[in-house]
Amino acid sequence: MSNPWNTRPPRPPGSAPERRRPPRAQEDHRPAHAAVPREERAAGASRSELRMYGLNAVHAVFARRPEAIRKVYLLESRIPALKPLLAWCVKQRVGYRVVEEGDLDRLAASTHHEGVVADVVKAEPVPMGDWLRALPAGQPLAALWLDGVGNPHNFGAILRSAAHFGVAGILLPRDSTLALSGAAARVSEGGAEQVPLVRMGQADNAATQLRSAGFSLAATLVRGGDDLFAATLPQRLVYVMGAEGEGMDARLAEACDLRLSIPGSGAVESLNVAAATAVFLAQWKQRNR
């Protein structure tokens, strides 16, 4: 009988059968390609875990937080690409299962899983005070304050841009419900593991803390702000990005040190928040090489 929560990579075709029994704790009577049980699909990861999918997303977790991995499900065709992860699972007695494509569709609740799904322990946001104390002194730094951003695909794209441009942190308001999801992790292409999420306190206190650490705050506006491409951008800058559609809170914008807009042709009203974030970060990076 084979073990659906494998602790070793499958044998090459034609090899002799393995005679040593797998560890008792890992035994199961279902074949390795058995459909994932309905209760397992429905339950998903626990509240402390995230069901993550996408090859780069899973690779990134393995590279930075391998101890967070709890279970892995994959297509047989993905075994070569995931050999180091599977070998680690064998060594650490973490279960993995080779399943069919339809099982992964149901596990991820998406067809965009790229052949692998993993249950991993969530990385909780760090308190702002801890984050500020850990920042390197005297270096140019950019951070993003997300004021109402909620779409997981936009969040994932923001994380990807943030990782690309070396953003120091994603700042979340105290009452924000924004959290990393499987969809956001996949869209981030590994960026979710590179950029820390930071939980702020009261908005005015957070602004004071940031300014004390040398940051200026820049409101990002669809219209009415200074031309981003002509503006002087401080070495330490927090871009405050508004919600999709309605934009950022007007009172928060007024309290910022800078108010910036991206000039365009006028053919469309604006960029979406993820695309705008990439433009703002690229311009900061260009000015602070």
Image: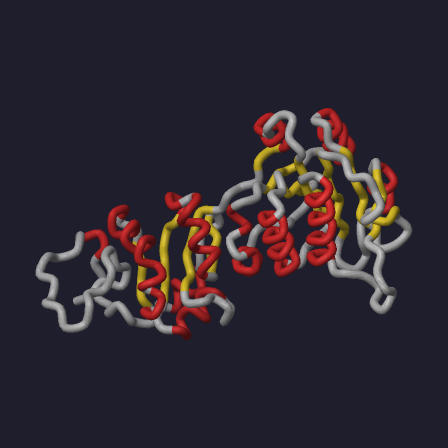
Query: At 31% from the left edge and 53% from the top edge, which residue is drawn?
Result: 84
Query: At 71% from the left edge and 52% from the top edge, which residue is drawn?
Result: 277
Q: Which image quadrant for residue 116?
A: bottom left
Q: Where is residue 125? Give x, y as percent.
A: 57, 40
Q: Where is residue 43? Give x, y as percent.
A: 44, 60
49 vs 155, left or right, is left
Query: At 84% from the left edge and 46% from the top edge, which residue is drawn?
Result: 230
Q: Is residue 174 visible?
A: no
118 vs 140, left or right, is left
**Colour scheme:** secondary structure
Is 37 in front, or is 256?
A: 256
Q: Where is residue 183? Give x, y as percent.
A: 55, 60
Q: Where is residue 209? Give x, y as percent.
A: 72, 28
197 vs 113, left or right, is right
Q: Give the quadrant of the N terminus.
A: bottom left
Q: Give the quadrant of the C terminus.
A: top right
Is 17 in front, or is 104?
A: 17
Is 221 in front, or is 288?
A: 288
Image position of 197 with respect to 50: above or below: above
119 vs 240, left or right, is left
Q: Is residue 271 visible?
A: yes
Image position of 257 with respect to 264: above or below: above
Q: How many discs mark residues in the rendered view?
A: 0
Q: Residue furthest right?
A: 224
Image position of 21 with respect to 103: above or below: above
